[in-house]
Image: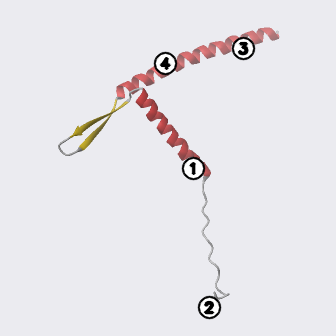
């Protein structure tokens, strides 16, 4: 026999995808991968392996060079300051020239 007409049809649940959190999650993943890539390139992280032949296992060791990270961070901050000072001086010079031209 068929369905009874008095029974209500069950509705499927609606799945709502929050696109902002989806993009944010993707952005965070990209940033983490970028930091890891830069860290390996700048030798902040070192991965070493050691074969243990007695039990056919491989030991993997991750070393983080915090001193190198701090040194690179200080150098980047110093370089950024220098470049910002140059840019600021250039903008002031251009503004002064423009001001003088309008007189």
Q: Quadrant of the C terminus?
A: top right
Spatial separation of the CA atoms under disc 3 and disc 2: 87 Å
User: Which label sits in the foreground, 4 or 2?
Assistant: 2
Query: Which of the two discs, 1 and 4, labels the residue nearer the N terminus?
Result: 1
Across and down, in percent, residue 38 comes to 45, 30
Q: Is 96 displayed left or right of 73 in the figure?
A: right
Query: Residue 78 shows which numbered tag?
Result: 4
Query: Which of the two discs, 3 and 2, labels the residue nearer the N terminus?
Result: 2
Query: Which of the two discs, 2 and 1, labels the residue nearer the N terminus?
Result: 2
| Element at label 3 | helix
Count of marks, rendered view: 4
State the residue in front, 94 or 29: 29
User: Which label sits in the foreground, 4 or 3?
Assistant: 4
| Element at label 1 | helix
* Crowd class of label 4 (few under 14; some 14 to 19; many from 20; radius 10 Å): few
Q: Which residue is mark 3?
A: 95
User: Which label sits in the foreground, 2 or 1?
Assistant: 2
Spatial separation of the CA atoms under disc 4 and disc 3: 26 Å
Tell me if label 4 and label 3 are in contact, CB under 8 Å. Answer: no
User: Which label sits in the foreground, 1 or 4?
Assistant: 1
User: Which label sits in the foreground, 1 or 3?
Assistant: 1
Spatial separation of the CA atoms under disc 1 and disc 3: 43 Å
Give the residue at x 51% y 18%: 79
Across and down, in percent, residue 67 comes to 35, 25
Q: Is 38 displayed left or right of 100 in the figure?
A: left
State the residue in front, 74 or 59: 59
Q: Which residue is mark 2?
A: 1
* Crowd class of label 3 (few under 14; some 14 to 19; many from 20; radius 10 Å): few
Q: Is 27 displayed left or right of 65 in the figure?
A: right
């Amino acid at each position: 026999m068929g369905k009874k007409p008095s029974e209500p049809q069950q509705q499927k649940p609606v799945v709502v995808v929050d696109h902002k959190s989806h993009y944010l999650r993707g952005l965070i993943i990209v940033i983490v991968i970028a930091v890891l890539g830069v860290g390996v390139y700048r030798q902040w992280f070192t991965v070493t392996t050691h074969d243990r032949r007695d039990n056919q296992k491989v030991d993997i060791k991750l070393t983080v060079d915090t001193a190198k990270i701090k040194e690179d961070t200080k150098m980047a901050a110093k370089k950024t300051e220098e470049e910002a000072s140059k840019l600021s001086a250039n903008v002031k010079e251009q503004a002064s020239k423009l001001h003088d031209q309008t007189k």
